[in-house]
Amino acid sequence: MKCPKCANSELRPTMIEEMLAAMGCGTCKGSLVSLLYYRHWAEQHKPAEKRAEAGEVTAAPTDTATAITCPKCDRIMTKFKLVGAVANRLDLCGTCDEAWLDQGEWEMLEQLHLSDKLPSVFTDSWQRKLRNENNEQTRQSILKRTIGDEAATKVEAFRSWLNEQRSKSTILTYLYRD
């Protein structure tokens, strides 16, 4: 199998973690991970009981910006975002159930405490949640740019208060009449 990123290098068996086999590229240091093997590893692997909050990514891993094809079936792999604050996207072949991790992306998953949630990243609900968070951040940014930081803070405080009110619709109706 050829590396989907380098296209010339052969993928060789490697281990991402103890008991987590993958096919790795010696040139770009990326890895092709079977989600079948991953799920087996995840069942055996027990994450630490007490975990710190997800930290910031300390080193920017490489990311394949262009579309890549699955080395097994030659179909285009789909890109999936991880979290809103990270630009990297993971590539998945939905046909073969194989994920491509660029160099440093596994370490990034560990830093974000997502290494034990990899299949979740590829779900519609995970991606929808990220889009909703991104939309909310965009709305807040536009509000701050339009009315200023101090006024936007007051609006957000009022919004939080309003969401707790049982008569929210009555309050909104009253405000809309102005």
Image (spheres, rainbow, N blue to C red):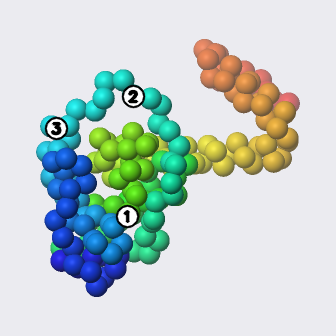
Whether 113 is drawn above or below 35: the answer is above
- Mark in the foreground, 2 or 3: 2
Work out which residue is located at the far bottom of the displayed protein and give it. Answer: 8
| Residue found at x 37% / y 64% | 102
Q: Label 3: which residue?
A: 43
Q: In the rendered image, which quarter is residue 164 located in?
A: top right
Report the quarter where the N terminus lies.
bottom left
Q: Earlier in the sequence, mark 2 or mark 3?
A: 3
Which residue is labeled 2 in the image? 51
* Mark 3 burial class by Cα count in 10 Å: few <14, some 14-19, many 20+: few
Q: Are marks 3 and 1 in contact (CB under 8 Å)?
A: no
Of residues 173 and 85, the one nearer the viewer is: 85
Circle on res. 175? none
* Circle 1 residue: 102
- The amino acid type found where label 1 is placed reads Asp
Displayed quadrant of residue 34? bottom left
- Circle 3 sits in a helix, a strand or a loop, which is it? helix
Compared across the picture, whether 37 is left or right of 111 comes to: left
Q: Residue furthest top?
A: 166
Q: Residues within 10 Å of mark 2 (few under 14, many from 20)?
A: few
- Report helix, strand or loop for mark 1: loop
| Amino acid residing under circle 2 | Arg
State the image coordinates of residue 91 (x, y, percent, origin top left): 35, 63
Residue 170 can be seen, yes or no: no
Q: Which circle, 3 or 1, is nearer the viewer? A: 1
Q: CA distance from mark 1 to mark 2?
A: 25 Å
